[in-house]
Amino acid sequence: MSLCEYTTQKDIRIGSRLLGTLKWGIFAVVLLYMCVILLTEKRYQKKDSIISSVHTKVKGVSDADSRIWDTAEYTIPSPGGSSFFVLTNIIKTENQKEGNCPEFPIPKTICSQDDSCKKGYADPQSNGIQTGKCVQFNSTFKTCEVRAWCPVEFKSTPEPAILGSAENFTVLIKNNIHFAAFNYTTKNILPEYNVTCVYNKATAPLCPIFRLGDILKEAGENFSQVAILGGIMGIEIHWKCNLDRWFHSCHPQYSFRRLDDKVVDERLYPGLNFRFARYYKNQDQTNLRTLIKAYGIRFDIQVYGTGGKFSWFELVMFIGSYLSYFGLATVVIDFLISLYCQSCCSATSGQRYYDERKYEEIPGPCVLTSCQELMFVSFVDQEDIKMVDKKLRKSLQMTIGKIIKRGKMTDNMVLAQLELSSFDGLEELPLYPRSSRKSSAIPSWCQCLKCLPATRFEGQLCCRYQNGECITNSEMFRKLVLQKQALVHILQYNNPLLNRHSITKKQLAECAQKQYVQWRFGSNMDILDFARIPNCCKHEIDNMFNGETCETSLEHADKETKMQSTSAPSSKPLLKQPPL
Ligand code: ZN
Ligand code: ZN
């Protein structure tokens, strides 16, 4: 392989209106699809993901549980910033003090006598450590006594929620975003922002102030329902930014949904709650506390999105990746053609013609077994050529090979035939009868009775597949392969400046072998190098050109030519080769 070489593919052009239309149809569909994807998905843009920061501010005042609730009471800020908590319901247990008191009645703690309670036992769900006594909780239940903060919490959630009016609270969400790849920063609060606006999907979709009740409504929830046990809501801010100068747009889109599972079993702690206590000291310096179980809604803000800007690199990459789809046309059409040719065993002449022109058949190489020498064999009594590519374990004649079609004649052969016509009758070469040798001297693999024994398997090849007349006995063999005049002309045809007196016997013998190969193997140029000449033919050629000196033979040839130009063709045989 040289640096100054370029290889390209050779194609076959099929004149067919149907296939041509199909090809352009597929091209058009692919092109259309490519354009649609390119424009709708903006595949010509380089994309970058968002970097964001969120800050929230909840506002609102409520009068509930005979007191005023303001921001400091009902919101619990989260240090993360991207979420906030709004209290909606509480269970308050005031004036708790360390001591012994009856446990709250649940199936596990209800008892009838002291034996049911275990001293020192603490259930993970209980309020304290059991003392081992069973005491009266109220007029109906007796429960185990515990050492705990007394009195224990009364486990019943108020309904409706104490802070149900929190649905009128508002939250301001400040969201700054940045695309590092484009060094672009923006925020969700626009310059024309109006402090009194309230978000509405239809009328004010860009207002960053949200009414809590509206958030739940957008998510398909009922605020007063969720407020009782609490829950988790998601506020999603989706940024889809087109940073191209000519189509610049970068605005947030808000959407809301509930994140916790609202349909849960009672045992799996539905909603969202936690406890906290406020401590103080009594006049007698004993520690007291107010326990608060807080239910509320946590709002998680999730910001996501991408920004894109035109990039030549992305455009070229996209076109490059989609070019391969144009190959779809080839796949589809080749499939149709293969369907058409499927019935080629019983094919019409048209199908057979197409099949022969489109496909060049070669046998598969011996990939798995180690590749031995490649040999091609042609028998005079067989139409096709045999290919052998395995190690010979018996004579080449007997080795089974793959069958290949014979090609057509080459120009050299045509030339030789032209030569033949001009020399016709010049060299009357005798036809030799089949060998009269003793049958014991003829090797077992020989079918023509003219081969000589050979030691190597490679050399054990006859001109025939089945018993019959030898090819060397044919007039054609003598005229095409052995006729010196024709060989000299062929050598000169190939090398016009070749001096006919300097032609050696070896050149003639090689030319004769080539003649034989081209004659018998056709135009498959790749085959010619590996073609094997049968034993009988090889001996005939050797005897012809190694038996006498080249000079004399050429002089003969010269004489013959002169005679031909002046007088009638001589009947004197040029070749005096005795039969074997
Ligand atoms: Zn033979
Ligand atoms: Zn033979």
Image (spheres, grey):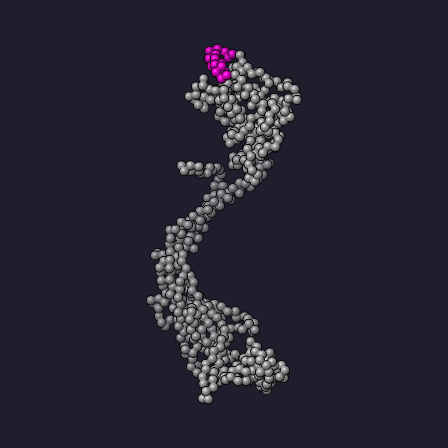
Q: Is residue 553 magenta?
A: yes
Please tell me whether the stretch drawn in magenta is mainly helix, strand or loop: helix
The residue depicted at 47 percent of the width and 76 percent of the height is: 88
Residue at the bottom extreme of this rendering? 284
Whole-percent x, y for residue 243 in the image: 36, 58
The C terminus sits in image quarter = top right
| Quadrant of the rendered image containing residue 47 | bottom left
- Image position, residue 326 (x, y; %): 46, 45
Q: Is residue 164 above or below residue 176?
A: below
Q: Which residues are magenta?
A: 549-571
511 or 549, which is in the foreground? 549
Q: Is residue 250 magenta?
A: no
Q: Position of residue 262 (x, y in %)?
A: 52, 70
Position in image of residue 111 (x %, y %) = 61, 82
| Residue ID at (50%, 23%) | 510
Left/right placement of residue 41 relative to residue 440 reads left
User: Considering only vertical position in the picture, is 150 above or below 529?
Assistant: below
Give left or right: position of 215 versus 460: left
Nearer the observer, 209 or 387: 387
> 263 or 339: nearer the eye?
263
| Outermost residue to the left | 191
Q: Can residue 299 be seen at all in this image of the molecule?
A: yes
Which image quadrant: the N terminus? Answer: top left
